Image (cartoon, helix red, strand yellow):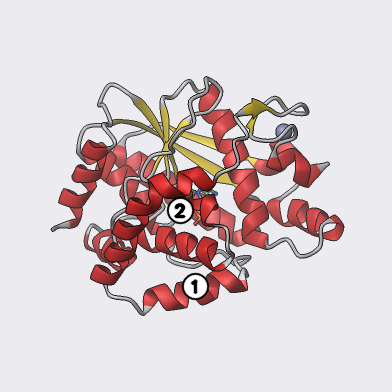
Amino acid sequence: MKLEEKFNQTLKKIKLSKKEKILVALSGGKDSCVTAYLLKKFGYNIEGFNIDLGMGEYSKKCLDAVKKLCEQLGIKLHVYDIKKEMGSSMCYIRAKVQHEKKGLKNCAICGVIKKWIMNREARKLKVNKIATGHNLDDEVQTFLMNIFKGSPELSANSGAVTQNVKDKKFITRIKPLFYIDENEIRKYSKQKKLPVIYEKCPCASDSYRIQMREFVDSLTTKQKENVMENFEKLFPKIEKLKTSEKLNYCKICGEPSRKKVCKMCELLR
Ligand code: AMP
Ligand code: ZN
């Protein structure tokens, strides 16, 4: 099946409507760029959102690519400047967190902070959904990492659409590239000559994920699809492993959280 067909099939599966306003989280990389390009191509109502992490030249290049893309697509771009909004760059925030909480990986800290920002800003912008560029490879890696760590329940909320979280303060996240191989996405972005930064984030140093990425890279598309297919069959069973903490609001920042204090405030306090 062609990439565009798979993309549309996923949107059908998650019942995305053209009436909904979707905020596409744009990093400057190929995946989120292709996500925005295709959503626009198929007539969805989208706007772009970039978190400028303030990581020197790399962040500047990413933001330039995102600006170019939004201009080409004729869509509005919202930029969240982390230095202005939070007082320092991601590198500094991360170093501070790691000073107190040793052993936490760069990508894990950055991921928590980005999700927190995305949800809050998307809510302010009154959009219906957030779309990210996560692809089949990312999801297979995450799933396998959770299995190897002995925490398959961490995968319970995974899927092309966030499951089981119904709360007015939580903005549903969708992953239209959930079933698409990273290599196909790279090829497509080059074919369409999209403005993309192919460089990896200079701070991505999570050795465990890198190891898993090398393994997933060695699989064929069919094998990756099989892992995902089986993973989805396991969903209902994994669901039962989850602790029954229901969604609450963080007592520090007021954002949706499963614990009394959200992951973001836990990191920064
Ligand atoms: P990553 O966590 O870097 O693998 O990125 C996964 C997805 O999160 C990307 O495909 C984007 O949709 C989104 N994302 C990552 N970094 C940013 C950023 N700086 N600004 C906006 N969205 C981002
Ligand atoms: Zn909080």
Please give the name of the residue rendered at 31% of the width and 67% of the height, measured from the top-left corner.
Answer: 224
Is disc 1 surrounded by few (<14), some (14 to 19) or many (20+) residues within 10 Å? some
Note whether 14 is above or below 156 in the view shown.
above
Distance from the alpha carbon under mark 1 to that under mark 2: 23 Å
Q: Is the CB atom of the residue marked by disc 2 within 8 angstroms of ligand 1's nearest atom?
A: yes
Residue 196, numbered circle: none
- The image quadrant of residue 76 is top left
Relative image position of residue 179 (x, y in whole percent): 29, 55
Residue at left offset 52%, top offset 23%: 167
Q: What element carries label 2?
A: loop
Residue type marked 1: Met
Image coords of residue 106 (percent x, y): 67, 61
Q: Which mark is residue 212?
A: 1
Residue at mark 1: C-beta within 8 A of ligand 1: no
* Relative side of 44 to 33, left or right: left
Measured as percent of width and height from the top left, residue 202 is found at 60, 67
Mark 1: secondary structure? helix
**Looking at the figure, which quarter contains the N terminus?**
bottom left
Residue 28, labelled with which disc? Answer: 2
What residue is drawn where x is 46% and y is 60%?
Answer: 143
At label 2, counting other C-alpha atoms closer than 10 Å, the crowd grade (few under 14, some 14-19, many 20 or more) is many
* Residue 199 in sight in this render: yes
- Say which of marks 1 and 2 sits in front: 1
Q: Which quadrant of the rendered structure holds the C terminus?
A: top right
Q: Which amino acid does label 2 sit on?
A: Gly
Report the residue at 32% width, 59% height from top: 230
Q: Is residue 96 left or right of 204 when viewed as pictured?
A: right
Please state the horizontal and vertical placement of residue 148, each as a whole percent of the image.
Answer: 54, 68
* Sequence-earlier tag: 1 or 2: 2
